[in-house]
Image (cartoon, helix red, strand yellow):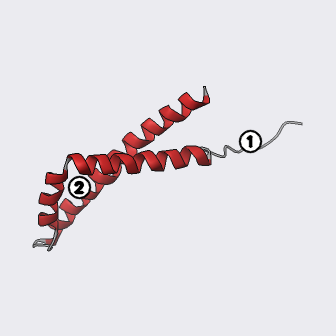
Amino acid sequence: MSDRFPEPNPGPSADLLALRVGCALLFAVVFTAIFWDVVIQWVRLLWPPTEPLSRWFGLAVVVAGGYLLGPGIVGTLVADWLYRRREE
């Protein structure tokens, strides 16, 4: 009798997820240190909010996306590479 349902895939291990978060945080700190002057300029543009609100919101989304997505993607790639290297 064959199984009707495939074996569940539990996903990445807890160690890999922790390594991904750590690498992403490390890259966020490094990106902030490298681009500190740009961060200071963006903070001046972000607060206080100016009219029109849609322009301010757009800038906030771009800034937040750059500091979340960039380090997150790079950190995940580096963490996966380190984890595979450690397993070998």
Q: Amino acid at mark 2?
A: Val
Q: In the displayed structure, would residue 47 be above or below residue 40?
A: below
Q: Nearer the viewer, mark 2 or mark 1?
A: 2
Q: Residue at left 79%, top 42%? A: 4
The residue positioned farthest toward the top in the image shown: 88
Residue 76 position (above or below residue 37): above
Cβ atoms under marks 2 and 1 closer than 8 Å: no
- For disc 1, the neighbor class at 10 Å (few under 14, some 14 to 19, many from 20) is few
Residue 11, image quadrant: top right
**Whole-percent x and y of residue 83?**
54, 35
Indicate the quadrant where residue 58 lies: bottom left
State the CA–CA distance, disc 2 to disc 1: 40 Å
Q: Which residue is mark 1?
A: 7
Say which mark, if any, is on residue 62: 2
Task: First in sequence, mark 2 or 1: give its number.
Answer: 1
Q: Position of residue 79 (x, y in %)?
A: 47, 39
Quarter of the figure that contains the C terminus: top right
Quadrant assignment, res 8: top right
Q: At 16% across and 71% down in the image, what residue appears?
A: 47
- Residue 73 picture location, percent across and down: 38, 43
Residue occupying the point 14% across, 74% down: 48
Which quarter shows the N terminus?
A: top right
20 relative to 25 in the view: left or right: right
